[in-house]
Amino acid sequence: MLAIFHKTVAHPPQELGCSESTSTVPPMPGYSRRQPKNPDEILRDFHSAHPAHAFCATFSGGAALACLGPRAPPPSLLHRRWFCSFDEVYCMFVGSLDNLSSLVRQYGLCGKSTNEALLVIEAYRTLRDRGPYPADQVVKDLGGSFAFVVYDNKNGAVFAALSSDGGVPLHWGIAADGSVVICDDREIMKGSCGKSYAPFPAGCMFHSEGGLRSFEHPTKKMQAMPRVDSEGMMCGASFKVDAFSKIATMPRVGSAANWTSWDDSY
């Protein structure tokens, strides 16, 4: 899956856009400088890599989602994939939920044809419409190995998460025009985002307004660590939970609480 969101839609951590000029490490012999590409080029690369199985949806708000169809050959489909939409909320889901049946009952979806992506859409809509649970708890309740990206075309909001086991590969970075790029194809990412390419942190969720946060340890801040690639150059950033930090948990008071309003000190 591939998701691209203009910088006016999503605001990733500034550490992700690491500049090569900040590196004090000399490049290895034969080092080839990779330049980030524009969204249109990245989408073309994705389609070129899977010419018979890729499809794409673009939105006027500055978003694009691309995914593979169910008949894509291995190794493209090492994990099950879903691409669904409901009420202008779109979800790309890779992996599986071990507790899908119980979650279907929890969200009152019994009797409906439901897969993992549709379940995530329903969970997101519950959060968006100010349901009774904090976002970290909702994502933590998803049992299994998964990665997903949700785009709300009504609100222009982005919500993404990666399971704590990191069993599904997920990467992100910054395109040439400043757009944030999220993809499970490592080679596409390396060629698309230059030195901002980095793994998406496991056990974390990202919202276009609330930023990056651990759903396993919601009271801890995220810490950006320097990252050196295989060519010995500084690139992107690795994000880890700061075990010594503590932030206030997000209060939930009836329908008045906004789940995207995470602590300002984060």
Image (cartoon, helix red, strand yellow):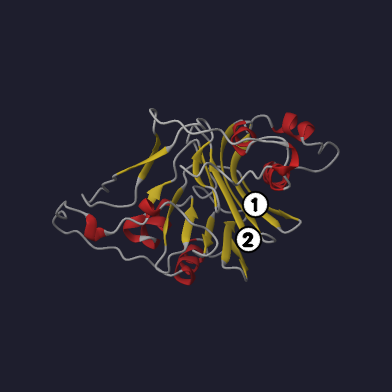
Residue 91's disc is 1
Does residue 175 appear to the left or right of 76 in the view shown? Answer: left
Question: Residue at left 50%, top 45%?
Answer: 264
Q: Nearer the viewer, mark 2 or mark 1?
A: 2
Does residue 152 appear to the left or right of 192 in the view shown? Answer: right
Residue 211's disc is none
Dot 1 falls on a residue whose secondary structure is strand
Does residue 104 appear to the left or right of 21 in the view shown? Answer: right
Picture coordinates of residue 60, whole percent (x, y): 62, 71
User: Badges 2 and 1: C-beta atoms under 8 Å apart?
Assistant: no
Q: Which of 205 and 184 lies nearest the eye of the viewer? A: 205
Picture coordinates of residue 179, whole percent (x, y): 47, 63
Question: Residue at left 42%, top 51%?
Answer: 13
Q: Which of 225 and 161 lies nearest the eye of the viewer? A: 225
- Check disc 1: other Cα within 10 Å, few if <14, some if 14-19, many if 20+: many
- Check disc 2: other Cα within 10 Å, few if <14, some if 14-19, many if 20+: some
Does residue 116 appear to the left or right of 240 in the view shown? Answer: right
Q: Is residue 98 above or below residue 262?
A: above
Question: Residue at left 57%, top 54%?
Answer: 72
Q: Earlier in the sequence, mark 2 or mark 1?
A: 1
Dot 2 falls on a residue whose secondary structure is loop
Picture coordinates of residue 255, whole percent (x, y): 75, 42
Q: Which of 87 and 263 lies nearest the eye of the viewer? A: 263
Q: State which quarter of the image contains the N terminus.
A: bottom right
Query: Disc 1 marks which amino acid?
Result: Cys
Based on the displayed image, in which of its 4 quarters is residue 259 positioned?
top right
Query: Disc 2 marks which amino acid?
Result: Gly
Q: Is residue 200 above or below residue 217?
A: below
- Name the residue furthest right: 111
Residue 156's disc is 2
